[in-house]
Amino acid sequence: MVIPYLGFLVLLGAERLVELALSRRNAARALARGGVERGRTHFRWMALLHAAFLPACALEALVLGRPFIPSIAAPMLVLALAAQALRYWAVTTLGPSWNVRVIVVPGDPSVRHGPYRYLRHPNYLAVILEGIAVPMLHTAWITAAAFSALNAVLLVIRIRCEEKALAEHCDYTRRLGDRPLLLPRRGHGPRRALETVPHAHPPIGDEGT
């Protein structure tokens, strides 16, 4: 089953290239509107880690001969697809404000609809889930463990940087401070969340892939 797995990785890679093109366009628009960029140093490391992720999955499956185990692959495929759905829910909610860098436009309100009704960083949750599910589709456990550990370190830095920038320029704390960080909590469901949103607001966001 390694050939279908490699095909799956190629599709993900193509999807990432589309994302990067969209991100570059949105970032240029944000900067043209007076956007402020933060976190360039850690972004370079994040970009390197994510660029290595899919090749590492492929190399581990091929070079180390990882087995395909259907009882593991089936739930991992569901998890990977769920992560993609969550990712694109966040991307479409943020619309033209989404990009993979930390760029905020002063005065734009922080979005609090879509998945942001439940979480402050749904896209990062998608990345965490994907970092486990995609390599484990073919039991590439070293890649899953290494990526997850390195990604966790970078996410701590990224989230602090991003939330500081949004708090300074986009009234982030007041609008999203009651949302949990990465995992939904009981009692913060659609009804309660919708009650806090009197009308739709133009989104602002900068979450990475």
Image (cartoon, rainbow, N blue to C red):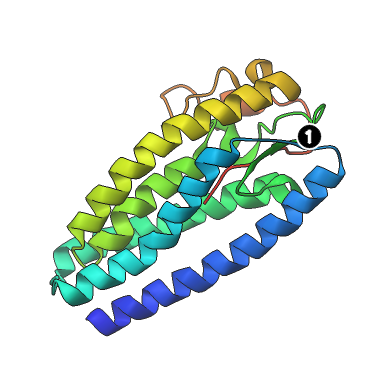
Q: Secondary structure at mark 1?
A: loop
Query: In the rendered view, does 193 fall on the left or right side of 145?
Result: right
Image quadrant assignment for residue 60: bottom left
Seen from the viewer's position, the closer of residues 75 and 173 is 173
Residue 7 place in picture, x, y as percent: 37, 80
Q: Quadrant of the N terminus?
A: bottom left
Q: x and y percent of residue 107 in the render?
A: 82, 26
Q: Horizontal and vertical percent for residue 4? A: 31, 81
Furthest toward the bottom, the residue is 3
Q: Residue at the location (17% across, 69% down)?
A: 70
Q: Which amino acid type is shown beneath numbered disc 1?
A: Val
Q: Is residue 194 above or below residue 79?
A: above
* 137 with respect to 195 (left or right): left
Q: Is residue 182 visible?
A: no
Vertical side of 135 occupied by 188: above or below: above
Q: Residue at x 75, y 58 (%)?
A: 25
Q: What residue is drawn where x is 54% and y is 30%? A: 120
The answer to which of 135 and 184 lies nearer the viewer is 135
Q: Going 36% across and 37% down the picture, which residue do you hit?
A: 152
User: Residue 50 versus residue 126: which sits nearer the camera?
Assistant: 50
Q: Tally the marks.
A: 1
Residue tagged by mark 1? 105
Occupied quadrant, residue 36: top right
Figure check: 76 above or below 176:
below
State left or right for residue 76 relative to residue 123: left
Decide: few, some or many residues near mark 1? Use Cα within 10 Å; few <14, some 14-19, many ≥20: many
